[in-house]
């Protein structure tokens, strides 16, 4: 009898303990009215129907947001959403209203039912634009289900922000611009003659909106490294980048570690080519196997390049940086992302002409890859008969002994005479 009594007490104790281990969710939407929420900025309609918040697009009004009256800092947020009529939407978090014009600004968890399929990416509304595009994560881009209910999860703890759709990770972002703000549901503005983002009457619905603000470290999803991690704090290394072996090639303030700085200036944490005459900027060190990451922005008609495995004279493979639209030299194997004068990069590439783009160059032995904004543009093998034949048939490289076959070499940024800006120059040596 005593044994049975002890077992019963133990079971009750374990049940009580397990109960304390459950996450403490708070529902932000009560299911029957919009208490705790306020519409701001636009005139699109938000109503409650059958336990859902339904936002309906209308013409001739800007982006409309239904914001929480409360603000939140660190949290885990979950919700379900469904879109009809191709309507672009999103969920703002750590967002605020700008005093000078009343515009909502801050992080937006994108809802994008268009063929671009960037649902689950991060757009910085009314500030910096795209911080995490789904070109960086094709598997995450495929997670959204059109015209069905989708589940979403956002974890924002300190500077680390991560998200999921239907259990699939969509973004992994490190940023420090805003730590506190409201949560808001967006109905995007729509236009009569432009239906990419939906038309009048298109809807986006939300339900089961809940948040957790306590004991977050216990319930946060363990880091897996499954998707690309993006650091939006310029010229720094996040803890994850450091742990993964990345290092800064440029400190954001000086030209330490580089030679030939004539014609280059440092402005707003950017390396900028401005003078019509100057030198190519080249690293002191040489590198052998590596991932190189460089953010760049070009101006109209500009041309530049990122050289790698190059000698001190600048004779080495070049990742071409050029304005394909306005520079007459941007032909055949001399377009943006191409291996200059040797291999053409696809014309259909994810370029942002008026913003920064991220070039990745991967070198492991004789295998080399060029990437742009998370999309691989081309790959090739060096030190092969086919490579040497291609070089010998090249107008620019055929007279350079052993071109492109160095075991190790410098990184070089080309001076071109027209403004081109660089930042976030990082490298990870591969062993």
Image (spheres, rainbow, N blue to C red):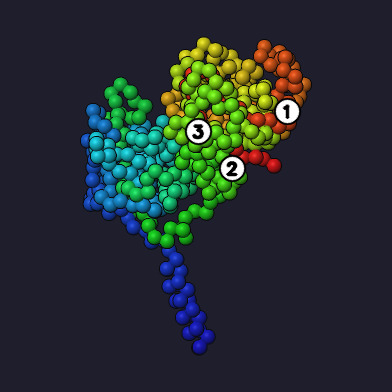
Q: Quadrant of the C terminus?
A: top right
Q: Disc 2 or 3, which lies upstream in sequence?
A: 2
Q: Is residue 358 left or right of residue 186?
A: right
User: Residue at label 1?
Assistant: 406
- Per the rendering, the mark at residue 246 is 2
The image shows residue 259 at horizontal and vertical percentages of 60, 29
**In the picture shown, does residue 71 fall above or below 350?**
below
Q: Is residue 407 left or right of residue 97?
A: right
The image shows residue 399 at horizontal and vertical percentages of 72, 14
Which residue occupies the extreme right position in the image?
A: 385
Label 2, label 3: how far apart the Cα atoms are: 15 Å
Q: Disc 3 or 1, which lies upstream in sequence?
A: 1
Identify the residue shown where x is 53% and y is 49%.
239
The image shows residue 330 at horizontal and vertical percentages of 54, 15
Disc 3 + disc 1, Cβ < 8 Å: no
Identify the residue shown where x is 23% and y is 45%.
38
Identify the residue shown where x is 28% and y is 23%.
192
Disc 2 crowd rating (10 Å Cα; few below 14, some 14-19, many 20+) is many
């Amino acid at each position: 009898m005593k044994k049975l009594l002890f077992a019963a007490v133990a079971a009750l104790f374990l049940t009580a303990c397990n109960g304390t281990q459950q996450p403490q969710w708070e529902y932000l939407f009560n299911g029957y009215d919009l208490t705790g929420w306020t519409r701001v900025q636009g005139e699109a309609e938000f109503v409650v129907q059958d336990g859902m918040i339904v936002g309906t697009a209308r013409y001739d009004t800007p982006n409309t947001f239904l914001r929480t009256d409360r603000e939140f800092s660190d949290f885990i947020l979950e919700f379900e959403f469904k879109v009809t009529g191709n309507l672009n939407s999103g969920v703002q978090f750590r967002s605020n209203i700008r005093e000078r014009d009343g515009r909502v600004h801050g992080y937006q968890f994108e809802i994008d039912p268009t063929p671009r399929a960037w649902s689950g990416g991060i757009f910085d509304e009314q500030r910096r634009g795209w911080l995490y595009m789904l070109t960086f994560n094709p598997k995450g881009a495929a997670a959204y289900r059109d015209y069905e209910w989708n589940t979403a999860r956002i974890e924002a703890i300190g500077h680390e922000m991560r998200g999921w759709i239907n259990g699939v990770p969509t973004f992994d972002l490190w940023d420090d611009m805003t730590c506190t703000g409201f949560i808001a549901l967006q109905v995007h503005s729509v236009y009569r003659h432009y239906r990419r983002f939906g038309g009048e009457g298109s809807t986006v619905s939300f339900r089961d909106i809940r948040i957790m603000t306590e004991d977050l470290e216990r319930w946060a999803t363990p880091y897996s490294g499954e998707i690309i991690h993006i650091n939006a704090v310029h010229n720094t290394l996040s803890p994850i980048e450091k742990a993964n072996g990345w290092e800064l090639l440029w400190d954001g303030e000086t030209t330490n570690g580089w030679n030939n700085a004539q014609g280059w200036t440092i402005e707003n944490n950017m390396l900028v080519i401005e003078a019509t005459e100057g030198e190519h900027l080249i690293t002191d060190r040489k590198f052998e196997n590596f991932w190189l990451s460089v953010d760049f922005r070009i101006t109209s008609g500009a041309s530049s390049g990122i050289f790698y495995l190059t000698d001190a004279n600048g004779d080495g493979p070049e990742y071409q940086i050029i304005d394909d639209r306005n520079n007459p030299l941007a032909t055949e194997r001399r377009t943006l992302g191409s291996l200059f004068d040797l291999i053409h990069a696809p014309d259909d590439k994810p370029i942002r002409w008026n913003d920064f783009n991220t070039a990745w160059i991967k070198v492991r032995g004789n295998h080399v890859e060029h990437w742009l904004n998370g999309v691989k543009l081309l790959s090739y093998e060096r030190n092969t008969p086919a490579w040497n034949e291609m070089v010998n048939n090249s107008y620019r490289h055929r007279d350079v002994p052993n071109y492109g076959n160095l075991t190790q070499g410098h990184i070089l940024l080309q001076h071109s005479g027209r403004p081109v800006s660089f930042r976030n120059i990082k490298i990870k040596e591969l062993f």
